[in-house]
Amino acid sequence: MGRHRDRLIPGVGLTLLALIPLAFLAVFFVLPVGGMLVRGFAPDGTWDFSGVAEVLTRPRTGRVLFFTVSMAAAGTVLTLLLGLPLAFVLYRLKFPRRGLLRAVVVMPFVLPTVVVGVMFRALLSAGGPLGFLGWDRSWIPILAAYVFFNLAVVVRTVGGMWEGLDRRAEDAAAALGARPAQVFRTVTLPALTPAIISAGTLVFLFCSTAFGVVLTLGGLRYGTIESEIYLLTTEFLDLRGAAVLSVIQLLAVVAMLAVAARGRARTEQSLTRSRGVARAPRGSDWPLLAAAGGVVAFVLLPVLTLVWRSVRDGGGFTLDHYRLLADPDASPALRVSILDAVSNSLRTAVDATVLAMVLGLCVSIVVSRRPRGVGARRLVSALDGAFMLPLGISAVTVGFGFLITLDRPPLDLRTPAVLVPIAQALVALPLVVRTITPVLRSVDPRLRQAAAALGAGPLRAAWTAEGPVLGKPLLAATGFAFAISLGEFGATSFLARPDRPTVPVVIYQLISRPGADNLGMALAASVLLSLLTVTVMGLVERLRVGSVGSF
């Protein structure tokens, strides 16, 4: 009876803990997405799927699907090819300023997508350092932005695994006469395969759901499923077409998350690893060091171009673009000054971060447990996957779903400025979970059992075992969520009121208008927002939490 009670109490506690984020997910994710689908498939209250074939056979739909898949595949392959040498250099070799380089590589992932688009326009447009290539307004900047944005996923996911691999198997193969290439192919690569598959799947997912980058660089000429949903919803009011594309995207996201989860599970099973395997570079490492240097230059070039062009006006240097940020009348595209938009961004990011942290901690505690029963394990796995869905589902779908479903009692949330923080928390929630959960899973459950055997209650036992290792991951997840919220654009572009825009929304408004002053102000605002997010991520990197960015 006593043993049964000991198992029952933690089970009830975990169930109650799971109900909070599940209720949030049901109201602010399932309901809006479902509402969007209902508006598309049952506009008159009766389900009608006859238009699905018509939408799928449109020539533009075919072009959008082909462009989405082909560009995502190309972006994934390129990101893996460039990211693997960089992961080796940053995680298997030891040299000065290695931590700084890691922060530089992670930086693009937290940059607002609109800012990344502005960077590549500044780099490749007429007057930019690479403007002579004539690639502006083509698909090449989109592909380059995909790689720039997702390198961090490959480097952190594969590098974190690579860093902990036991070198003894590689050393044994080398001692038996295997050449370095053979050692990599027969020993290292099989061990890294789960992490590579997981990273590649997520890169494909992020590329195929890119929104701000495609909207900024592609315009109406090049569109992905995500940007097409935006255009169908806002420009053509074609909710049926948007609903069909949303369903296609949802099915693809579920399939890719399942593959990524499988790879992640195999990675975590392989984490009986050694520490301190990094070594000093050798002569044979110089090709990889050169390749890694090229990749770092590729990351820095658009960033430095952005800064350079933000202080240029005509033929000289100027700070006028930065001075105009404080003038609310500087551009007819704006109703408030950009400094007011910065204030709005900070307030909403703080609210979103608090919400994401509370929910993320609840989810992480639940999904980090490993119940004995098969059914319970499958339920925990399903919960883990469910909270990853906002990572890949269209932010446009979520944002528009908010507007059409949360506009009547008892959930009329249009007037209070709460929708933007909630939408940003939804985007940040999966990343918070992926930061904290691996740390909790690494704690030996026998520590909790030992504390319970000594008389500690469930909460006290959990705190005794897990509290000491949670400090840095919580701070890192907080910084990560804050940076992601600052740069969120997809859902915010729908939900932000004209008199309370965030910085990414203001930047998009500026670059959508002609005029040198508008472009200059957009560049200056992008620099400020980049500095803010990079500073936050620099502090996160200082915490040295290996699970950050290891999705």
Image (cartoon, rainbow, N blue to C red):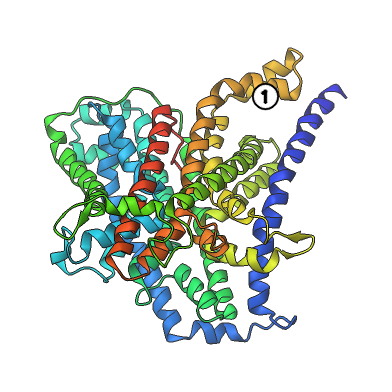
**Position of residue 148 measured from the top left corner of the image (x, y, whole percent):** 31, 52
In the rendered structure, the answer to whether residue 16 lies left or right of residue 217 reads right
Could you say where residue 481 lies in the image, as x and y percent from the top left? 51, 42
Dot 1 corresponds to which residue? Answer: 462
Residue ID at (68%, 36%) = 371
Residue 339 seen in the current view: yes
| Position above or below: 345 against 436 | below
Q: Position of residue 415 (x, y in %)?
A: 68, 60
Number of dots carrying numbers: 1
Instruction: Find residue 117 and report its image quarter.
Output: bottom left
Residue 66, x across and y down, in percent: 39, 74
In the foreground, 26 or 444: 26
Q: On the rendered image, what quadrant is the N terminus found in? A: top right
Above-or-below relation of 216 to 463: below
Residue at x-position 48% and y-position 62%: 335
Residue at point 68%, 74% (across, down): 38
Q: Label 1 sits on what residue type?
A: Ala
Residue 479 position (above or below residue 280): below
Q: Secondary structure at mark 1?
A: helix
Residue lying farthest to the right in this orientation: 1
How many residues crowd mark 1 within 10 Å: few (<14), some (14–19), many (20+)? some
- The residue at 77%/14% (across/down) is 455
Q: Quadrant of residue 191?
A: top left
- Could you say which is closer to the camera, residue 474 or residue 85? 474
> Do we see residue 393 in this rendering?
no
